[in-house]
């Protein structure tokens, strides 16, 4: 999870003399006296395969506080006027094992039936809203804050909503590397929190986005837009719509993606490719929950949940000024990091068999199995194209196989001939490319040396690709390509 940076400065939500600030100066004993009665608030931890106890779920929809922690998520139903303190350990009412939290970090109080007051209790790492540190704020249903690095969301939930173990997600979830992520998915889907999916191309981000939408209970459609495929001059018209005559070629009025997805989900794929002017417009829409069509002045309210995806390091881009920092924090309430296929080796065989069956059926073939040596090569391949590349390889094999099983020679050449981590065509800069075929060990050592040099340069420059490329004397595009070939990625935080 990406933590907000620790900043200093006055809050925009309260003054230094506010009641919230005075509470922040109180002792831990004072905080302890605000503990919630057992009968009015229940904390439901999420354990693998466990459902929230029936008596912990109200029969009518009620306001809930959802702590979207990666390993220790919690659900708390709030009672009007009864404070709930979230922190790292007792005397906090809700304890979450996270080092970015203070012992008693923040207090939440339901005011009426639609507003929750949050007050920071003098925490070390702060309470954050939209990238700004606050002392106190009023949160509406669907809004959230970060306590240190822990996202907390306010939602209205019904007791009938299932928060248990998720279903298997075909094409994405079969192995241990994805299990923890999928166990958190029902909690995330139940909220209205913005979700950022981070992973390499072909890892299944769109499939995961669709599962979040389908599990959310939202009645509208999920509308996908590839931000990198829209001409820069048409981005705002595509997202927010336009009026007739708004620009050359606008022959008639047209709704945008946000209106088309009303009541549902907008999936912004490749969000890192969005131009800066469009980023500013998108931030306004997310804050106002309304769109203004190009060429119009009237705002149109929209109720959408936003899920975005990228293979880029948006946090680093924000630091370099190529992606708006305030938009990053607005989109990244919850960050899900999807491992590449090379880190999900136990998924390769079942995925390959499923793709083989689909390809055989589509082409009228009777291929049903994979030979042991072919399977071994599949499992040792680097898969820079991830699941999409594996699917392509099995479609290739299904067409060429002469019998009822895929043999090694039926696999694509890039898979059949290349060793682990090397499956992209040679760009003319591959270390060891002129070495004889009898020296794979030497080529492997040269590749390992290159990977170490690249990683050291990236770490020295804070994982800024532009700075690392300059340090190495390479074009940024070449550096990005070599990182992909060699399987170099920033370690999850």
Image: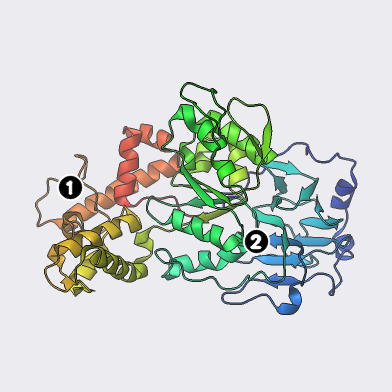
Q: Is residue 469 above or below residue 82?
A: above
- Judge by depth and name the residue closer to the eye, 97 or 334: 334
Residue drawn at (71%, 45%), measured in percent from left and top? 129
Left or right placement of residue 75 versus residue 477 in this view: right
Please state the horizontal and vertical placement of residue 222, each as a whole percent of the image: 53, 52
Tell me the colour scheme of the image: rainbow
Mark closer to the chain start, 2 or 1? 2
* Residue at disc 2, secondary structure: loop
Quarter of the image where one finds residue 421: bottom left
User: Which residue: 50% across, 55% down?
Assistant: 209
**Residue 199: percent from the left, percent from the top?**
44, 52
Q: Is residue 302 visible?
A: yes
Of the pair 250 and 363, the residue shown nearer to us? 250
Q: Sort mark 1 into few (<14), some (14-19) or many (20+) by Cα contacts within 10 Å.
A: some
Q: Is residue 246 left or right of residue 354?
A: right
Spatial CA span between label 2 and label 1:
45 Å
Looking at the rendered image, the quarter that the N terminus falls into is bottom right
> Residue at label 1?
432
Give the side of residue 393 with respect to residue 175, left or right: left
Q: Judge the density around disc 2: few (<14), some (14-19), many (≥20) Cα neighbours within 10 Å.
A: some
How many numbered discs sit on the rendered protein? 2
Task: Please state the horizontal and vertical placement of residue 242, each as a whole percent of the image.
Answer: 56, 30
Residue 410 vertical position relative to residue 404 in the rendered view, above or below: above
Q: Are marks 2 and 1 in contact (CB under 8 Å)?
A: no
Q: Is residue 345 above or below residue 450?
A: below
Q: Residue at x 36, y 70 (%)?
A: 346
Residue at numbered disc 2: 98
Tell me, for residue 363, which label it has, or none. Answer: none
Give percent across and percent down for residue 414: 19, 54
Secondary structure found at label 1: loop
Res. 77 image quadrant:
bottom right
């Amino acid at each position: 999870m990406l933590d907000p940076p620790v900043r200093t400065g006055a809050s925009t939500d309260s003054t230094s003399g506010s009641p919230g600030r005075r509470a922040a100066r109180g002792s831990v004993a004072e905080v302890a006296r605000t503990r919630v009665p057992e009968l009015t608030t229940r904390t439901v931890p999420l354990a693998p395969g466990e459902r929230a106890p029936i008596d912990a779920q109200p029969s009518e929809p009620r306001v809930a506080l959802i702590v979207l922690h990666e390993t220790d998520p919690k659900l708390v139903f709030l009672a009007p006027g009864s404070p709930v303190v979230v922190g790292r350990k007792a005397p906090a009412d809700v304890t979450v094992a996270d080092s970015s939290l203070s012992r008693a970090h923040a207090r939440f109080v339901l005011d009426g039936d639609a507003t929750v007051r949050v007050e920071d209790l003098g925490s070390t790492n702060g309470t954050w809203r939209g990238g700004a540190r606050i002392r106190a704020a009023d949160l509406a249903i669907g809004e959230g804050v970060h306590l240190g690095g822990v996202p907390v969301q306010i939602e209205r939930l019904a007791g009938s909503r299932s928060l248990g173990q998720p279903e298997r997600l075909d094409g994405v979830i079969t192995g241990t590397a994805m299990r923890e992520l999928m166990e958190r998915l029902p909690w995330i889907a139940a909220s209205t929190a913005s979700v950022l999916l981070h992973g390499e191309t072909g890892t299944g981000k769109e499939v995961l986005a669709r599962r979040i939408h389908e599990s959310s209970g939202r009645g509208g459609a999920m509308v996908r837009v590839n931000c990198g495929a829209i001409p820069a001059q048409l981005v705002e018209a595509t997202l927010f719509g336009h009026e007739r005559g708004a620009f050359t070629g606008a022959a008639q009025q047209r709704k945008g993606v946000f209106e088309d997805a009303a009541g549902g989900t907008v999936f912004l794929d490749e969000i890192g490719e969005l131009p800066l002017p469009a980023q500013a417009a998108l931030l306004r829409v997310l804050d106002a929950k309304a769109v203004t069509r190009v060429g119009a002045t009237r705002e149109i309210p929209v109720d959408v949940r936003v899920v975005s995806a990228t293979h880029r390091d948006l946090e680093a881009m924000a630091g370099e000024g190529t992606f708006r920092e305030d938009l990053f924090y607005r989109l990244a309430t919850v960050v899900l990091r999807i491992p590449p296929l090379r880190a999900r080796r136990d998924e390769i065989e079942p995925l390959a068999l499923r793709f083989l069956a689909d390809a055989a059926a589509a082409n009228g073939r009777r291929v049903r199995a994979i030979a042991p040596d072919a399977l071994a090569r599949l499992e040792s391949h680097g898969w820079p194209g991830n699941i999409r590349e594996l699917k392509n390889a099995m479609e290739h094999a299904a067409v060429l196989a002469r019998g009822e099983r895929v043999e090694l020679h039926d696999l694509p050449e890039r898979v059949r001939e290349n060793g682990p981590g090397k499956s992209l065509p040679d760009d003319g800069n591959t270390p060891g490319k002129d070495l004889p075929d009898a020296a794979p060990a030497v080529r492997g050592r040269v590749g390992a040396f290159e990977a170490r040099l690249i990683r050291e340069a990236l770490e020295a420059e804070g994982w800024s690709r532009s700075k690392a490329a300059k340090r190495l004397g390479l074009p940024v595009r070449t550096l990005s390509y070599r990182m992909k070939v060699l399987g170099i990625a920033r370690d999850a935080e």
